Image: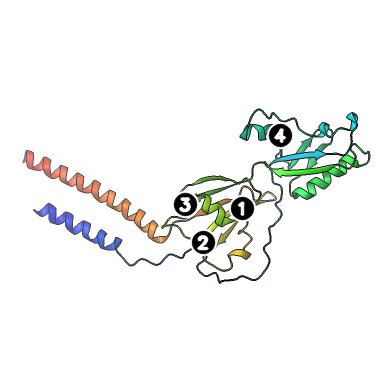
Amino acid sequence: MRPIRLLFLIVLPLYLISCGTQKKAPYYLENVKDSIPGDVKTPDLRIQKNDLLSIQVYSASTKPELSDALYNLPCNTSTGGASNANVCGFLVDANGDIEYPRLGTIHAEGMTKQELAIEVKKRLTQPVERLKDPNVIIRFLNYKVTVLGQVAHEGIVEVLAERVTILEAIGLAGGITDYGKKDAVKVLREINGKREVGYVDLSSDSLFVSPYYNLMQNDVVTVEPTKQKRKQVDQAIVAQRITFALGLITSAAFIYNVFK
């Protein structure tokens, strides 16, 4: 009977601790008012190293020797998905450059799509007119963000459009779990070869003016666990150790009773 009482005295305090008062977790946009002043602005994305770009050139020229096909990568349309993108895309290398057929090396890192399009068009028309009235269309082929931590589905979120907010990214990851901190979501971002970390409060009315509300390609979003979750993890570890210790004590007591 004594071992049962000892086990009860050990387990009871752990149960009482786990049933302590729990602080109410904030909810999405909890402090946002009915209307928020200001226009909705979408920032221009800056090209980064390892970005994969689709660059298509179109021209009004009808002469074979001035065909715009000479300045477009050949695409294997029989293959789909990522394979097709790899064939058709320009990869921004470790130096921030792309190698463009017939135009040479172009430094793309730090530019917007519009700025790079202007540079490509300039090289097509100056100092020699290679194409007549060229149009240049650029798209990101590998726009993605990574969501980690206390969400339903951790992993990489691929975005077909070239815009995603932090709310949309978390929604695509299945939302934050009951044990995730909504008032301190961390965003890891690389800009011009330097890493920066920002925090976003998803319950605050200042969310929409945060520089991390609109995510950039390759951002990493992490949702940290609440103190309650950390406490539960610590309690689980303690419980495992106590269970192991009780197992040793029980085994030792059994062996003692057998051989005494």
Instruction: For mark 1, give the secondary structure.
Output: loop
Name the kind of residue labelled 4 in the image.
Cys
In the rendered view, does 138 fall on the left or right side of 178?
Answer: right
Q: Earlier in the sequence, mark 3 or mark 4?
A: 4
Select label 1 or label 2 by which is in front.
1
Circle 3: residue type: Val
In the current view of this chain or complex, which residue is farthest to the left?
260
**Which residue corresponds to the image point at 20% horizontal and 45% vertical from the top-left?**
247
Circle 1 is placed at which residue position?
Answer: 164
Using the numbered discs, state the Cα–Cα distance from disc 1 to disc 2 in whole angstroms: 19 Å
Callout 4 crowding tier (Cα within 10 Å): few <14, some 14–19, many ≥20 = many
Image check: 254 left or right of 200? left
Q: Which residue is mark 2?
A: 184
Front one among 238 and 34: 34
Question: Which element is circle 2 on?
Answer: loop
* 3 vs 4, front mark: 4
Residue type at mark 1 is Val
Numbered disc 4: secondary structure: helix
Q: Amino acid at mark 2?
A: Ala
Give me the C-alpha separation between circle 3 and circle 2. 14 Å
What residue is disc 3 on? 151
Badge 1 vs badge 2, beta-carbon distance below 8 Å: no
Q: Which residue is mark 4?
A: 88
Distance (Cα) linking label 3 and label 1: 17 Å
Quadrant in the picture for residue 105: top right
**Residue 117 point in image, percent of width and height:** 80, 46
Res. 99 image quadrant: top right
Answer with mark 3 or mark 2, whichever residue precedes in sequence.
3
